Image (cartoon, rainbow, N blue to C red):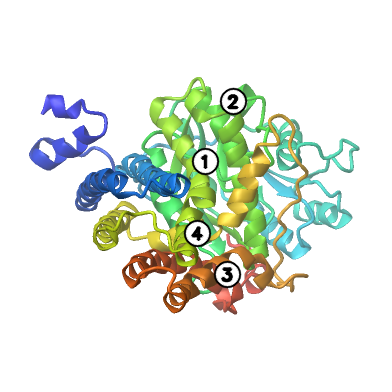
C-alpha cells in the first residue's frame, strides 16, 4: 500500500479503492464525495485504457495513401484523449468547504473597489448600494473607480457615501484598461484586504464575512467566490458554467491554485503589493494576476457558494466578444509565457494552467477536423480507413460511451455535454483569437468593455451571420450522406460509418445555433430589468 500511494496518478485511487478502512477523511466533504469520486476515477481509467487501445488499433487501419487526412484524423484523436487524460486526472479530487468557515474572522481594514466604465446608472446604483450594505465589523471603505469620468456616477457616489476616484477626470488617461483602473484605485486605498467588484456584480451582505476567514491562512493571496449570473431560462449559452465553477475550481482549490475571476474576489493587499499590483500584461487582469501570484509562491482558495450576481451575455455577439477576450488572454499567456516553462509553479499547477490553453486549441482546431473529414469522404469517395468502417463504428462508440460516463461522474452531473457543446460550438471565435494571440508577444490590442445592459437591444447584424461557419458545417454533414448515396461517390458501408461521425458533429454544433436563434424567456427575479430595480439587501 505504501508503494501504491507513491504513484503520482493511480496511487491515491488504488489505495482508497483497495483499502478504504485505512483512509482517514480529514477534509470537509471528502467522505460524502467518496462514491462519486471512485466511480469517476474508475471510469476515467477505463476510458484511458479504452482510448489507448482504440488509438493503437486506429493507427493500423488508417489508409496512409492519404497521409495528410489520415495523419490529421489520428492526431485529432490523440489530442482529444490527451486533453481528457490531463483534465480528468486533474479533477479526480476536489476540495469542499462548509458554508461557514472554521477559522475565526479578523476585522482588518478592508476596501471594496468597484470598476465602472460606462455601465448604465441603474446597474451601478444597485451594485453600489449593495456594496455599502455589506456587513463588516472593521473599517470598510467603498471606492467607485470610474474610467469614464461620469458626473452622474460622481454625484451618485457622493450621495450614497462612497469614495469617487476617476483617473479620466484626473488626467491620468486609461492605460491598461481595467487593470490600470484597479491599480489607480489601489494606490489610493489603504485596507489590508481588497475586494474587487465589476459594476454589474451585486454582492450579498455577508460576502466579506464568508471570504475573509480564509485569508488568515498564511500565504493565501486571494479567495474567489463562486460566480452567479442573471441568465434566461435554461441558460442557453451556458454562462453559469457549472463544470468550471462547481468542478474545476474546486479541483484547482485542491492544488491551492484557484483562478481569480475578476469580481467577487477578496485579495490580500500584501500579495498585490509584492506582485506590483494587478497584472497589466493582458487585456484583463484576472487570469494573469492569478498566474503571477501563483508563480511567486502564493496560494488561492475557493468559496464554492455564490455571493454576488451579475450580468452575462444573452446574444451570440455578446458571447463571442466575452469568450473571445477570454481565449485571447489565455492563448497569449500560453504562447508567450507558457506555464510548462514558468518558474515558481509546481508541476500540477503548470499542468492545470496548460490545460486551460490546450482546451482552446482543441476546440478551435482539433474538433473541426471531425466535422470536415466526413464531408471530404462524401465528396471525394475516399476514406481514412482501409475497409474497417464497421469495426471503427463499434470501437469508437464503445470509447465514446466510456468517456461520456466518466465525464458525467467527473463533473458532478453538471451538464458536461452542454459544456462540451458550447466549447466546440464556438470554435470560430476560439480559432480566430488563438491566431490573434500569436501576433502580440509584447504589446496588446485595443480593448472595449463588454457592457451589459438591462434593456436588451437588437444587434446591427442578425445572429445568423455569426453562425455562418457552424451552419455551413452542420448542413454539409446533414446533406453529405444523401449526396454520396445519390451520386454514388462511395459505398453505402463507408457512408454509414461516416454518418456516425456526422451525427456527432451535428449534435456538437446544434446547441450554439439553437441558443443563438431561439427566443429567450426570463424568470422575473432573474430578469436584469427587474433585478437592478430591486433595493439593496441588508
Q: Which residue has dot 1 on it?
A: 357
Name the residue furthest top.
Answer: 343
- Residue 509: x and y in percent read 50, 66
- Residue 193: x and y in percent read 59, 35
Q: Quadrant of the C terminus?
A: bottom right
Q: Residue at x 58, y 68 (%)?
A: 472
Q: Could you say which is closer to the camera, residue 341 or residue 98?
A: 341
Q: Residue at x 57, y 48 (%)?
A: 264
Q: Which residue has dot 3 on it?
A: 471
Neighbour tally class for label 2: few under 14, some 14-19, many 20 plus, Cα within 10 Å: some
Marks 1 & 4, CB-CB < 8 Å contact: no
- Residue 114: x and y in percent read 69, 47
- Check the image and report above or below for 129 versus 1: below
Which disc number belongs to residue 461?
A: none
Q: Earlier in the sequence, mark 1 or mark 3?
A: 1
Q: Which residue has dot 2 on it?
A: 270
Neighbour tally class for label 3: few under 14, some 14-19, many 20 plus, Cα within 10 Å: some
Q: Which residue has dot 4 on it?
A: 372
Neighbour tally class for label 4: few under 14, some 14-19, many 20 plus, Cα within 10 Å: some
- Check the image and report above or below for 22 versus 161: above
Instruction: Choose mark 2 or mark 1, whichever is in front.
Output: 1
Amino acid at each position: 500500500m505504501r508503494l501504491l500511494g507513491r504513484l503520482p496518478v493511480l496511487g491515491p485511487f488504488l489505495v482508497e479503492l483497495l483499502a478504504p478502512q485505512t483512509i482517514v477523511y480529514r477534509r470537509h466533504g471528502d467522505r460524502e464525495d467518496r462514491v462519486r469520486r471512485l466511480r469517476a476515477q474508475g471510469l476515467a481509467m477505463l476510458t484511458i485504457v479504452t482510448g489507448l487501445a482504440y488509438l493503437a488499433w486506429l493507427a493500423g487501419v488508417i489508409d496512409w495513401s492519404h497521409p495528410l487526412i489520415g495523419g490529421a484524423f489520428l492526431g485529432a484523436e490523440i489530442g482529444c484523449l490527451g486533453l481528457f487524460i490531463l483534465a480528468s486526472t486533474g479533477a479526480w479530487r476536489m476540495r469542499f468547504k462548509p458554508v461557514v468557515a472554521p477559522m475565526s474572522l479578523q476585522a482588518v481594514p478592508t476596501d471594496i473597489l468597484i470598476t465602472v466604465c460606462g455601465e448604465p446608472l441603474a446597474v451601478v446604483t444597485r451594485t453600489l448600494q449593495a456594496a455599502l450594505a455589506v456587513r463588516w465589523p472593521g473599517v470598510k471603505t467603498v471606492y467607485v473607480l470610474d474610467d469614464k469620468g461620469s458626473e452622474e456616477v460622481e454625484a451618485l457616489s457622493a450621495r450614497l457615501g462612497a469614495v469617487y476616484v476617476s483617473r479620466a477626470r484626473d488626467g491620468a488617461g486609461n492605460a491598461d484598461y481595467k487593470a490600470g483602473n484597479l491599480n489607480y484605485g489601489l494606490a489610493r486605498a489603504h485596507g489590508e484586504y481588497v475586494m474587487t467588484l465589476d459594476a454589474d456584480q451585486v454582492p450579498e451582505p455577508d460576502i466579506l464575512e464568508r471570504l475573509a476567514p480564509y485569508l488568515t491562512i498564511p500565504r493565501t493571496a486571494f479567495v474567489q467566490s463562486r460566480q452567479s449570473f442573471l441568465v434566461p431560462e435554461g441558460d442557453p449559452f451556458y454562462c453559469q458554467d457549472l463544470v468550471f465553477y462547481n468542478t474545476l475550481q474546486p479541483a484547482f482549490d485542491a492544488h491551492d491554485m484557484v483562478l481569480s475571476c475578476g469580481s467577487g474576489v477578496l485579495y490580500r493587499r500584501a500579495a498585490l503589493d509584492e506582485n506590483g499590483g494587478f497584472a497589466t500584461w493582458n487585456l484583463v487582469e484576472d487570469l494573469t494576476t492569478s498566474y503571477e501570484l501563483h508563480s511567486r509562491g502564493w496560494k488561492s482558495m475557493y468559496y464554492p457558494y455564490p455571493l454576488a450576481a451579475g450580468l452575462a451575455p444573452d446574444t451570440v455577439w455578446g458571447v463571442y466578444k466575452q469568450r473571445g477576450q477570454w481565449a485571447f488572454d489565455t492563448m497569449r499567456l500560453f504562447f508567450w509565457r507558457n506555464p510548462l516553462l514558468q518558474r515558481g509553479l509546481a508541476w500540477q499547477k503548470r499542468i492545470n494552467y496548460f490545460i486551460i490553453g490546450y482546451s482552446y486549441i482543441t476546440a478551435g482546431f482539433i474538433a473541426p477536423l471531425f466535422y470536415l473529414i466526413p464531408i471530404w469522404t462524401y465528396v471525394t469517395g475516399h476514406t481514412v480507413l482501409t475497409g474497417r468502417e464497421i469495426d471503427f463504428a463499434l470501437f469508437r462508440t464503445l470509447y465514446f460511451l466510456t468517456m461520456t460516463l466518466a465525464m458525467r461522474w467527473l463533473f458532478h452531473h453538471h451538464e458536461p455535454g452542454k459544456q462540451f457543446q458550447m466549447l466546440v460550438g464556438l470554435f470560430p471565435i476560439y480559432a480566430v483569437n488563438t491566431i490573434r494571440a500569436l501576433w502580440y508577444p509584447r504589446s496588446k490590442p485595443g480593448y472595449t468593455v463588454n457592457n451589459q445592459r438591462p434593456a436588451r437591444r437588437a444587434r446591427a447584424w442578425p445572429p445568423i451571420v455569426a453562425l455562418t461557419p457552424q451552419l455551413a458545417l452542420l448542413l454539409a454533414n446533414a446533406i453529405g450522406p444523401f449526396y454520396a448515396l445519390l451520386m454514388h461517390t462511395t459505398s453505402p458501408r463507408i457512408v454509414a460509418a461516416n454518418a456516425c461521425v456526422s451525427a456527432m458533429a451535428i449534435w456538437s454544433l446544434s446547441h450554439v445555433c439553437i441558443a443563438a436563434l431561439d427566443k429567450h424567456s426570463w424568470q422575473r427575479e432573474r430578469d436584469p430589468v427587474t433585478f437592478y430595480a430591486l433595493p439593496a439587501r441588508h
